[in-house]
Amino acid sequence: MAIDWYNEFVNLNYEPEKNELICLYYFEPAAGISGREAAGRIASESSTGTWTTLFTMPPRMKALQATAFDIEGNVVMIAYPLDLWEEGNAVQLLSGIAGNIFGMKALKNLRLIDVSLPSAYTKHFKGPHFGNDGIRKMMGITGRPFTGAVPKPKIGFSAREHAKIGYETWMGGFDFVKDDENLTSTSFNRFDDRVEHMTKLRDVAEKETGEKKSAFLNITADVETMKKRADMLAENGWNYAMIDVVVAGTAAVMTMRDYCSDLGLAIHAHRAMHATFDRNRKHGITMQFLAKLMRLVGVSQIHTGTAVGKLTGSRRESIALADLLREKKTAAVEGMLLEQDWGKIKSAFPVSSGGLHPGLVPDVLDIYGTEMVLLVSGGIHGHPKGTRAGATATMQAIEAWQEGVTLEEKAKNAKELKEALGKWGHYKPV
Ligand code: CAP
Ligand code: MG
């Protein structure tokens, strides 16, 4: 009598149906396990299977089995019947394709690279409320990247001090002031105090510059607290809320997407903690998948790396991430992305951040183009003449890229940029 039935989940002649979800996994079988068996185990445990054959399985349930239909070396594609998945419940999707399978003894390593979601699945999600055109309209800014900065050091300022640095950031020409990922509501900088001070100085900055100024204030907490904080933002005329989406969790983001949309707030998604599962190239979940999940559940923008700054992430990866957030349809990219048609789901902005300064702006814009949010924090507050000059230098670097001239050329008539280049040049942080 057969003990297990993993082979029943492999069929290399199988052609997936249009409405099936397709997952791409990298896997390494444990010693003594064949590639085919390992692939079958992934398909099995992530759909209807368990470790042994069952006495209790009605034949109709065969239709819910996932099928590993393509195995090439260490990469497998698995097709999942649509009926396995609850409509509009992204959390349940994770429990399947990113769940138990990661702990199986039979696998040495497993990495979920991407999933192609059919329109029969995506149609149950709302996606971003505004879309990139909507955000552009809301901010009244076209033709250039959005710019923003976090007051640094990242945590420690009082609400008043924080807002003053924010004011300098806006006055230097930036659109957004951003809270840092670990700043929420601490004893020395309460969320409501920060909102109050930021609101006052935003109004002053808008009056003095005649430009729209905004902020990503970090509401991350339990859901009920996040709702109260979102209310406060809306009452004070803000158009964004920031959430640390990985630590808060997908369910919380789904709830807050609807809540924030009703209040007219876009969501800035900080991805703190993503590197715990996406950094190891052989195991975990990729950033592509996280970005796709977050667009699906409806954030307006999410961090996607710099390739040239202080944090890990390649140029190829940043480009893939930008495309999957911005485009209506994306083609497959070898070993990285599966095809995706977003249907009615609106676009989201990629956010490039981490170790940037004016001297690196052209590199980042070469990767992303202008449909992005550029965050330069240490790289403006460390400017020899201070925050405002640092922001101005960054705006000058953007202009240089748009004019097609080198930063050195531009710096001849742009003293803030000249000073920034004098300190950092084109230094790439390690
Ligand atoms: C950047 C930053 C961002 C990281 C997040 C920081 O500050 O505020 O949180 O960029 O990483 O705390 O490091 P600097 P990622 O501009 O001063 O480096 O964008 O890769 O998710
Ligand atoms: Mg930060």
Image (tube, grey):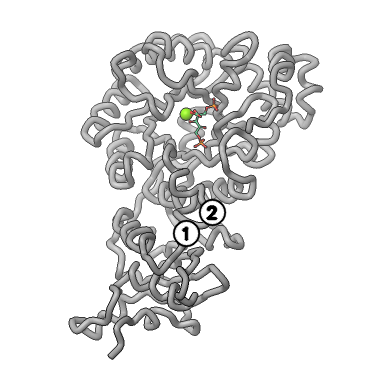
224 w.r.t. 151: above or below: below
Q: Residue at x 43, y 80 (%)?
A: 10
First in sequence: mark 2 or mark 1?
1
Report the amino acid beneath label 2: Arg
382 w.r.t. 303: above or below: above
Asked if residue 121 shows in the view, the reply is no
Residue beneath label 1, please? 111
Residue beneath label 2, please? 281
Cβ(mark 2) to ligand 1 < 8 Å? no
Image quarter hosting the N terminus: bottom left
Residue 65 drawn at (x, y percent): 33, 76
Q: Residue at x 38, y 9 (%)?
A: 160
Query: How far is the residue under mark 2 from the one under mark 1?
Result: 8 Å
Asked if residue 48 shows in the view, the reply is yes
- Mark 1 is surrounded, within 10 Å at the Cα level, by few (under 14), some (14 to 19) or many (20 or more) other residues, namely many
Q: Residue at x 79, y 28 (%)?
A: 405
**Residue 185 shown left or right of residue 204 in the figure:** left
Image quarter hosting the C terminus: top right
Residue 267 drawn at (x, y percent): 39, 36
Residue 264 drawn at (x, y percent): 34, 33
Residue 173 drawn at (x, y percent): 58, 18
Quadrant of the rendered image containing residue 191: top left
User: Which of 23/123 is in front?
Assistant: 23
User: Which of 126/314 is in front?
Assistant: 314
Could you say whether the residue bearing mark 2 is in a helix, strand or loop?
Answer: loop
Q: Are marks 2 and 1 in contact (CB under 8 Å)?
A: yes
How many tags in the picture?
2
